[in-house]
Image: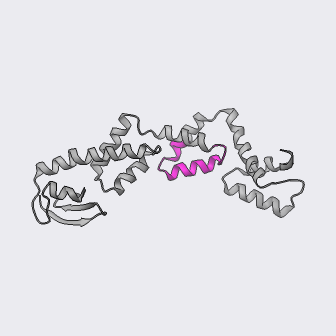
Amino acid sequence: MKVIKIEDFSKTKCRILLEDTLPIVLYKKDLRRYAIEEGKEISEQQLHILIKEILPHRAKARCMKLLQSRDYTENEMRNKLKGDGYPVQVINEAIEYLYGFHYLDDRRYVEAYYRTYRNRKSRKQILLELQRKGITKDDICIILNELISPEEESEELECIRGFLRKRKYSDNEADCTEREKTKAYLFRKGFEVNDIVFCMKNFEWKNL
């Protein structure tokens, strides 16, 4: 198979464009190691070693390094590997490996994310942020419905009261304009209007 073109991918990597297959990204030092040159042939055996052995090993190592600092969703990890230039088949193998050893678990990610932010963000805001991380709305809702107990339902109201305390809101002293501004502020945070009105009614931050 002929090497059509070699172009810079980053300071240390380059993209190799090949005949009849997707491009691959290698370190520049790999060009010397595997005698890869523009316009020259690369054997099927050599290509097999790169795609089936070298790149999968590197992709898995990259994933493990990323997971040392925090959890990732499947979508986030796929985007990271794609940004590093790994071909689809290598990414799929790395993702399968992570699931096989439970290094990757979107359910665990949703549960941990909810427990971290449930007292600081509305449920709707948490839902939207998890969707942006590539988890489907249906999957998130199923997990949250199983996770949230009747006692935790009241935490949504306490979260609203926390924002009211930060704003030093007093219902007895607030005029119509301040009430509407406060409602709009909390609504933008993702809270339900009925919950907002319930918490604002007779709220006095000085007494808390």
One can see residue 201 in this view: no
Q: Residue at x 81, y 50 (%)?
A: 200
> Per the image, is 128 magenta?
yes
> Per the image, is 193 magenta?
no
- Residue 53's image quarter? top left
**Eyeballing the image, is 25 above or below 56?**
below
Query: Would residue 135 be found to the left or right of residue 18 on screen?
Result: right
Q: Give x and y (percent) for residue 115.
A: 60, 39
Q: Residue at x 41, y 37 (%)?
A: 103
Query: Would residue 80 be found to the left or right of residue 2 on screen?
Result: right
Q: Give x and y (percent) for residue 41.
A: 9, 59
One can see residue 139 in this view: yes
Q: Give x and y (percent) for residue 75.
A: 42, 49
Q: Residue at x 33, y 56 (%)?
A: 84
- Residue 36's image quarter? bottom left
Name the image quarter holding the N terminus: bottom left
- Residue 184's image quarter? bottom right
Name the image quarter holding the C terminus: top right
Q: How is the image coloured?
A: one colour
Q: Give the residues in magenta.
A: 118-140
Query: Would residue 31 be found to the left or right of residue 191 on screen?
Result: left
Q: Give x and y (percent) for residue 157.
A: 73, 43
Most foreground residue, 14 or 164: 14
Q: Residue at x 16, y 65 (%)?
A: 4
Residue extending furthest toward the right: 172
Query: Would residue 82 be found to the left or right of residue 144 on screen?
Result: left
Q: Main secondary structure of the magenta part?
A: helix
Most foreground residue, 142 or 147: 147
**Eyeballing the image, is 10 above or below 199?**
below
